[in-house]
Amino acid sequence: MDREWIDYAATGKNYSYSTKTTVVNLSFREAAKGCEKIINAKTLTICEICMGVGSEPGRSIQLCPFCDGIGHEVVEGVDERYRVTCRFCQGKGHNVVHKCKNCLGFGKTLVERNLSIPVPAGIKDGEILKINVDPSDSDAYRGTVDKQSIFIQFKVEASDYFKVDGFDLHSSADISLPQAIFGGKILIDGLWSEEEITIEPGTDSHQTIKLAHKGLKDNERSSYGDHYVHLKILIPKKLSIEEDRLLREYASIETNTIGTINNIDQSKF
């Protein structure tokens, strides 16, 4: 019978059990800021057919001949004796002769459960975390399965707004021509919150503004990267009659132009 892989290296009580890695998809912001995520994962639970005994219902089990059913052995040391878990029955005190077909004699099976897991801020694409989960309500009530570990691999969606450089973030923001000339304020979408940026008079296109410590979290150093905002001056594609007249008047008197301006005569100034 084909079964999903389970690490049964420790099958007695007070041991942790490992199952297959569960893949969890995260948006860029979920991974960067951290969140609570409801996932569907497989964990071990007591076999409902044999109720954890491991043998077919109605079939007898064999008392472990190595430990006489007590689940542990006494090993002679140099100066004293040590009690260790029985290597033959793994501490159960019995051996299964007719194994349960549902759990293959292990007494536990994998079942799907909805689990709420905390996702720490700063998770990277492909990162794997080991997370301890509590037993199901029925197993906790019966005391048949202890806390166990599952492995979560995170797949992080790339951002179409931020560009990532290590722990630093880069984004673009548009400003109008009057804002570039006279200055002003704009609101941009930051990672952690909405940010207000002051535009200084005479701002050039592609000028960069640094928002310190507003980038990704560096969990190893307990610090944050920076957020760099690259400004872009929006040139109007269509002008009203009044806007066209005013800009032509300005173009005819300004003195910084190198070369010529279409349909503008600057020679008389």
Image: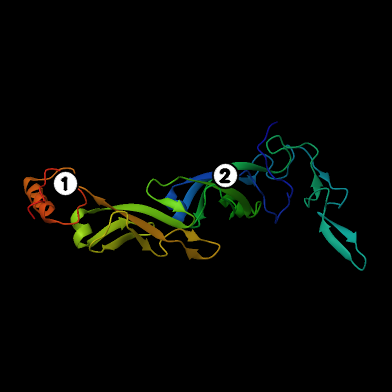
Question: Is residue 146 visible to the viewer in this orientation of the structure?
Answer: yes
Which part of the image, by quadrant, shows the N terminus? top right
User: Residue 89's x, y, as percent?
Assistant: 81, 48
Q: Is residue 223 above or below residue 115?
A: below
Q: Can you identify the residue that label 2 sits on?
A: 22
User: Is residue 113 found left or right of 52 in the rendered image?
Assistant: left
Give left or right: position of 263 versus 180.
left
Between marks 2 and 1 in the image, the one whose residue lies nearer the viewer: 1
User: In this orientation, which residue lies closer to the viewer: 64 or 30?
Assistant: 30
Residue 251 x/y as whole percent: 13, 52
Q: How is the image coloured?
A: rainbow
* Residue 35 seen anywhere in this rendered image of the structure: no
Q: Residue at x 91, y 63 (%)?
A: 77
Q: Amino acid at mark 1?
A: Ile
Question: Is the C terminus in the top left, top right, bottom left or bottom right quadrant?
Answer: bottom left
Question: Secondary structure beneath disc 2?
Answer: strand
Amino acid residing under circle 2: Thr
Q: Residue furthest front?
A: 267
Q: Using a 10 Å C-alpha cutoff, classify the residue at mark 2 as few (fewer than 14 neighbours), some (14 to 19) or many (20 or more).
A: some
Classify mark 1: helix, strand or loop.
loop
Q: Residue at x 71, y 54 (%)?
A: 13
| Distance from Cα at disc 2 to Cα at disc 1 | 63 Å
Residue 26: x and y, percent?
47, 47
| Residue drawn at 20 percent across, 54 percent down | 177
Residue sitting at x 39%, y 51%: 162
Extreme-top residue of the structure: 1
Q: Which mark is residue 128?
A: none
Q: Please provide percent x and percent y for residue 54.
A: 73, 42
Pointer 1 residue? 261
Please rate how many residues cluster around mark 1, counting C-alpha atoms within 10 Å: few if below 14, some from 14 to 19, many from 20.
few
Q: Earlier in the sequence, mark 2 or mark 1?
A: 2
